[in-house]
Amino acid sequence: MVKRERFKLSLSVFLFLIKRNEVLLIKRSNTGWMDGFYSIPAGALDGKENLVQAIIREAKEEVNVSIAKKDITLVHTMHNITHGEEWIGTFFVTNKWKGKLKVNEPEKHSEIRWVSLDNLPRNTIPYVKQACKAFKNKKVYSDYGWRDQIA
């Protein structure tokens, strides 16, 4: 039997931490990519972990909170092309966590802040802004960076 070579994509996880119709944003700094722009807690999927394990890990690493698996819901998937690279982003939401929110990786982030989903800063990473809009409008899929972009 011939083994078929499959197309491979990287996968990232993102977390909407929600409190009273506001989302927690984290400002990038000292990374060399999109510094000065806001995102939400996020990161790449590591090997030998599932998506939920990855977002729980990223929440702890980036903003110092622990989240129970039962309190996380997948709400959006985005197929992206950025800087010529194709990848998938999966967006989860929770409004329950334990721990005191803080910038837990000061070498990568300079601040965290709560912002209304209706009033994101201009300097929010564009695909994050699109995902916030999709989440607010209950759209489970969008793509970013393609000619026939769906918002």
Image (cartoon, helix red, strand yellow):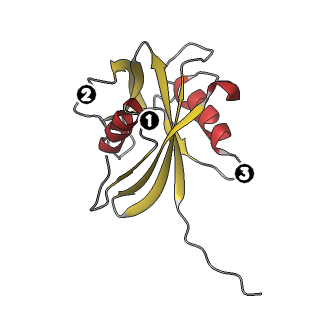
Q: CA distance from mark 1 to mark 2?
A: 19 Å
- Identify residue for label 1: 108
Residue 142, numbered label: none
Side (left or right) of 99 relative to 79: right
First of labels 2, 3 by sequence position: 3
* Residue under the image location 42 percent in, 12 percent down: 20
Classify 10 Å Cα crowding around label 2: few (below 14), some (14-19), many (20 and above): some
Quadrant assignment for the N terminus? bottom right
Amino acid type of disc 1? Lys
- Identify residue for label 3: 48
* Residue under the image location 42 percent in, 34 percent down: 138
Amino acid type of disc 2? Pro
- Identify residue for label 2: 121
Q: CA distance from mark 3 to mark 1?
A: 24 Å
In the image, 73 versus 104, the foreground residue is 73
Residue 106: image x %, image y %?
Answer: 46, 28
